[in-house]
Structure formats: structure tokens, C-alpha cells
Amino acid sequence: MSRLAAGFVLATLVVPAAAGQAAQPADECLMLSYFVGNGEDGLHLAHSRDGLRWKALAGGRSLLRPTVGRDRLMRDPSIARGPDGTFHMVWTTSWNERIIGYARSEDLVHWSPQRAIPVMMHEPTARNSWAPELFYDQPSGQFLIIWSTTIPGRFPQTGGSSESDYNHRVYCTQTADFEAFTPTRLLFDPGYNVIDGFLAAAGEEYLLFFKDETLKPQPRKVILMATAEKLLGPYTRPTEPISPRDWIEGPSAIRIGDRWFVYFDCYRRHRYGAATSTDLERWTDVTDKLVVPAGTRHGTVFRVDRETRERLLAVGG
């Protein structure tokens, strides 16, 4: 069995809900924050009831244009809601900067002034801060921000294994208020080049989805999952990819009823993809059943209440 096929089991899409596990609550809706093109025009949102059929909000228009960073981009927008109901968003501002963008909103329509979080400014040779993701950890009452960075000379054993001499690992910082941050630290080093980390909680376990960014000596470019008992790890070394597709990136995961959905950007195919699982071990590719707005890139899935959804629908779309 090939590396890409191992651990992947084809199954029908519809899976009966297990006892005690509800379907998507009637008063909640799924949202997807994403960008199009190179991220020049900013934040896009789509909504869904079932996790498979997504429709753009605001008629597909941008809901927030970027003002932070050298290149004024808003790539990889990640949104998470805090315990007070406030939405927080982080994003990639540039291909080669040591900051990430940040803004907050009460309703996903009106946003605070944008500002930069200097996550890697203490590393003078750091090349980038890519694909930040937000995760709110209830036990600690803290947000964890994770992202990928290349620091030349670090991890020399995998130097030259990717495009343009990038050699990423996943870094993190914690904050309760987006004013004070813990010192940046290394979160995940599986022994190879990794980007696009995404965190989720499953009971008392933490799940870290990520992309193996290895190009040489043989391309991998697949999504894998590692687990940990503590938020800051250590995270296990993953086994097999969650999907048979390669050249994919930007994973985002959420549980809907008794199934986990993992979404990803099939960037070489110019389309979006997804896989589902009931046990986080055997995955079903549902890409052919997925409908997303044209041009969707690197989205983050999250939940909103019905009031927020109705307010966004009133904007148009």
C-alpha cells in the first residue's frame, strides 16, 4: 500500500449520528473565513448548514480590506470567538515579514483598527510568519496563536528540502487579551519542514493538523495530524496522511455531529477539498461533494450564532 493510500478507507457520506451526539444545532451556523487571489482585497466569508454546501456572504465581496504590513495582504484569515463573544482574527500580511495582522469584531461586519503583532521580531534573520491560526483554550482561558517560520541555519538536517530554501517549523504565543503575549516558542518540530498548523480539541486531547512541506528528495505536500495531552505538547509524530490527495495545504477542522470534517486547499487543482472521519483514523474523501465559492483559498471554519448569521446575510449574499 502506498504512503498516500494507507489509513484511508472509502465509505458512504451519510453516517448515522451516534447516541448522545447531536447534529448541527439549529441556532448555530458554520462560517468559513478565506481569501481569494493573493489576498489583496481582504476578508471573505461563506456560510453553511451541513459543512458541504457553502455560499459566499456579502455577494462574494470583501468584508475587510488589509491595511497592515509591507504588502498589505490578508492571506490565511483565521477567526476564533472568545468567551465574551468577541471575534478575533489573525492573518498573513506578507510573504516575507516577521509580523502577523490582527483585528477584532463584535459582529464580523464592523472591525477594530488593524494592527501588527510582532511575533518574530526578536529573530532578526527570520524570513516570514505564515498562516497564523487562532485557538481558544477553555481550560487555560488563553488564546494560542500558531504560525510557521523559517529561520536560516535552524534545523540544518532538513535545509534545502523545500522551495526557495524555506525550512519551516511551527511556533506559538499565548494571550488572554491580545495586548500581552508570552514569549514566542517552538511548538512543533516533527523532524521535517511543516507549515499551516491548525489546532482543535477532542475531549481531553489536542489535535494538530498540518502540512508536510517537504519537496526534496521526493515531494510529500500532504495533510497529517499529531496529538497531545497538553496544549503546548509534546505532540506525537503522525502516521499517515488524512487524505490520498497530495499537493494540498491549509487544513481546517471541525466536528459536526459524529463526524470530523477537515477542509484543505487543493492549490494545484485550483479547487477546495475535504475529508471526514468518525474516529480520526479512517478518512473518507468528500471533495467531490464539496461546494465552495469560486476562488476560495486557505479557509478557517468556525461556528457563529443565528443572530450573527442573520446580520451577515443582511449585508448581502
Image: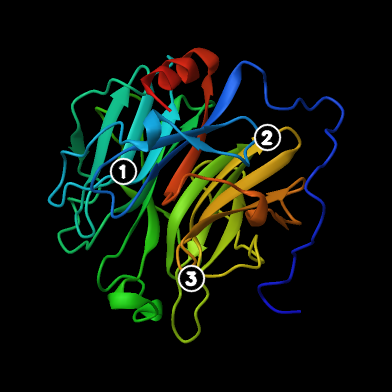
> Horizontal and vertical percent for residue 291?
58, 46
| Marks 1 and 3 in Cβ contact (< 8 Å) | no
Decide which of 291, 151 is in the foreground and name it. Answer: 291
Q: Amino acid at mark 1?
A: Trp
Residue drawn at x 50%, y 31% is 137
Which dot marks residue 114? Answer: none
Which dot marks residue 91? Answer: 1
The image quadrant of residue 125 is bottom left
> Which element type, helix, strand or loop, lies under badge 2?
strand
Residue drawn at x 31%, y 31% is 63
Q: Residues within 10 Å of mark 1 (few under 14, many from 20)?
A: many
Residue at the limit of the structure toward the bottom, as seen here: 217
Decide which of 211, 75 is in the foreground and name it. Answer: 75
Judge left or right: residue 285 versus residue 41.
right
Disc 1 or 3, which lies upstream in sequence?
A: 1
Which dot marks residue 256? Answer: 2
> Horizontal and vertical percent for residue 284?
73, 56
> Horizontal and vertical percent for residue 25?
67, 21
Q: Answer yes or no: is residue 155 visible.
A: yes
Q: Residues within 10 Å of mark 2 (few under 14, many from 20)?
A: many
Q: Quadrant of the N terminus?
A: bottom right
